[in-house]
Image (spheres, rainbow, N blue to C red):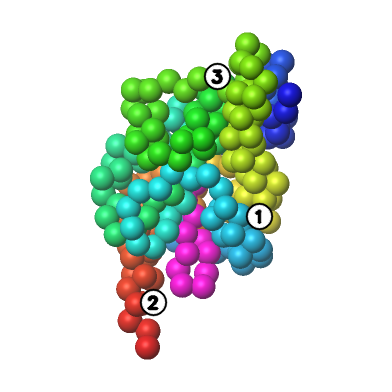
């Protein structure tokens, strides 16, 4: 059987090794919390594009990394899920617990934005990703789905965000990554007005690109 790729430390069970990530909010955020990805920006963007995200909407792309147990991701979902018109939002879960590991694998397998909403609202329960009772073919499929997210997170996304000062430890929930023309930016944590600033920047950059001769 295949094995789950660990996320730097932390033992949550005999078959599932993960690390606790940060789930951050803030009373106030500003432009200093938005980090331009100067080193390895294209590698990061290409890696994200190849990951099994669940997309909704059309327009310039915004990637989000979240987990449903995070209260700030829940707040982001409640306050912004229906307010992102004109943006293609590409959702990815990441694993910090057994539940989030299960949901990470399930969403990667379905790539269905309706599943994302169902998990965030607690209307759907993901099957255990590392259930030892599963036939080998099903177990391996689950592990492949899990690793298709956590492998790139551990090997590419986190190291690039760290090297650019966007994080100091593990991935923050929620983390938002987007482009403004030829530049890539990232921001972590949640505050309503901060997300309003980010979405306005994304939309303004898209308008500027369209208006170029």
Q: With respect to residue 24, does 193 lie above or below?
A: below
Identify residue for label 2: 209
Q: With respect to residue 70, does 173 lie above or below?
A: below
Label 1 element class? helix
Residue under the image location 40 percent in, 39 percent down:
112
Q: Position of residue 100 (x, y in %)?
A: 52, 27
Marked residue nearer the N-terminal end (1 or 2): 1
Identify residue for label 1: 160
Q: Position of residue 92 (x, y in %)?
A: 49, 42
Q: Magenta part of the protein: which range?
A: 175-185
Residue under the image location 39 percent in, 62 percent down:
60
Label 3 element class? loop
Marked residue nearer the N-terminal end (1 or 3): 3
Is residue 177 within the magenta segment?
A: yes
Q: Position of residue 203 (x, y in %)?
A: 33, 65
Marked residue nearer the N-terminal end (2 or 3): 3
Q: Measure the alpha-carbon separation of dots 1 and 2.
A: 26 Å
Side of 63 where 1 appears, left or right: right
Q: Residues within 10 Å of mark 1 (few under 14, many from 20)?
A: many
Is residue 129 within the magenta segment?
A: no
Q: Measure the alpha-carbon separation of dots 2 and 3.
A: 44 Å
Can you see residue 29?
Answer: no
Q: Nearer the viewer, residue 72 or 184?
A: 184
Q: Main secondary structure of the magenta part?
A: strand
Which quadrant is home to the C terminus? Answer: bottom left
Residue under the image location 26 percent in, 49 percent down:
83
Which of the two marks, 2 or 3, is nearer to us in this view? 3
Identify residue for label 3: 128
Q: Position of residue 189 (x, y in %)?
A: 46, 44
Q: Which mark is residue 65?
A: none
């Amino acid at each position: 059987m295949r094995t789950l790729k660990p996320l730097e430390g932390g033992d949550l069970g005999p078959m599932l090794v993960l690390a606790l990530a940060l789930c951050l909010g803030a009373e106030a955020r500003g432009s200093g919390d938005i980090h331009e990805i100067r080193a390895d920006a294209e590698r990061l963007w290409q890696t994200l594009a190849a990951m099994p995200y669940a997309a909704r909407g059309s327009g310039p792309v915004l990637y989000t990394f979240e987990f449903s147990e995070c209260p700030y991701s829940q707040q982001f979902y409640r306050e912004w899920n229906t307010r992102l018109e004109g943006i293609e939002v590409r959702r990815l879960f990441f694993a910090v617990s057994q539940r989030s590991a299960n949901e990470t694998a399930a969403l990667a397998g379905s790539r269905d934005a309706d599943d994302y909403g169902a998990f965030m609202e607690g209307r759907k329960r993901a099957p255990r990703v590392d259930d030892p009772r599963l036939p080998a073919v099903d177990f391996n499929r689950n592990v492949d789905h899990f690793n298709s997210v956590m492998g790139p997170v551990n090997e590419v996304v986190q190291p690039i965000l760290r090297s650019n000062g966007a994080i100091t430890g593990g991935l923050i929930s929620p983390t938002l990554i987007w482009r403004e023309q030829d530049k890539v930016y990232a921001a972590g944590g949640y505050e309503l007005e901060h997300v309003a600033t980010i979405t306005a920047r994304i939309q303004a950059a898209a308008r500027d690109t369209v208006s170029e001769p």
